Amino acid sequence: ELKAKQTGEVKPKMAQPPPPSIALPLAAYIPQEYVPNLETRLGLYRRLAKVNRIEQITDIARELSDRFEELPLPVKNLLHIVEIKLLAAGSGVRSISKEGKQIVLNFNEGKKMGKLPGREDYKDAVKIGTTQIRISTTQLENKWLELLEKILRDLSLTAQPSE
């Protein structure tokens, strides 16, 4: 990169979109009872904030289980949200939030929705538009989180790199 810059061959870098905002109805945190030491808890939050690969989440989950025993639900939810954020960032998703009885995925400007593999798996619980996807939480009950992760994985399969 430096050599190319010296010879004037550097292409301007594309501006990266900001990380997606995630606002889901999940209790997602590290309980004080689970990790009593404040410094350790803060260190874990910092590590989770820097995660950029799914494998790192698995490693952190394994480490927490080894050090502090079984993961409580709020920690599992926190790890899910970190994974969702990673998948969303790689799929052109700008935000994920709950609106009424739906989970809504909004896409970055310029992101074109194509066909999703596995669309038949979603049935009537998912409405796909050109700028957003809506997932019905009433039709799915407790399975909306699982479906959200599947949709994000499917989106990341169809994501095309920007030129």
Image: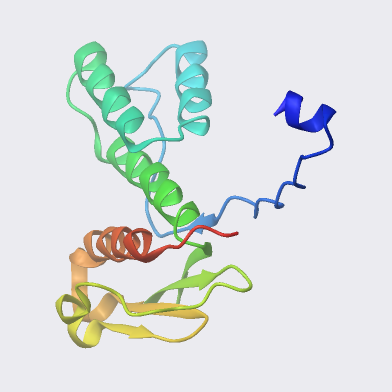
**Furthest-front residue in this view:** 7
Residue at 74% x, 31% y is 4
Q: Position of residue 134 (x, y in %)?
A: 39, 79
Q: How many marks?
A: 0
| In the image, residue 71 above or below residue 41 | below
Q: Residue at x 46, y 53 (%)?
A: 90
The image shows residue 31, relative to residue 114, as above or below, that is above
- Across and down, in percent, residue 163 comes to 60, 59
Q: Quadrant of residue 127?
A: bottom left
* Nearest to the observer: residue 124 or residue 114: 114
- Front residue (pair 51, 157): 157
Asked if residue 66 shows in the view, the reply is: yes
- Residue 100 in view (yes/no): no
- Residue 133: quarter of image: bottom left
**Residue 76 rendering spot, x and y as whole percentages:** 28, 39
Q: Residue at x 52, y 81 (%)?
A: 131
Residue at 24% across / 65% down in the picture? 147
Q: Is residue 118 left or right of residue 135?
A: left
**For residue 16, side relative to residue 99 (left or right):** right
Where is residue 96 shown, x and y percent of the image?
48, 64
Q: Nearer the viewer, residue 112 or 148?
A: 112
The colour mode here is rainbow
Q: Quadrant of the N terminus?
A: top right
Q: Position of 109 compared to 140: left or right? A: right
**Location of residue 25 with respect to 121 vertically, above or below:** above
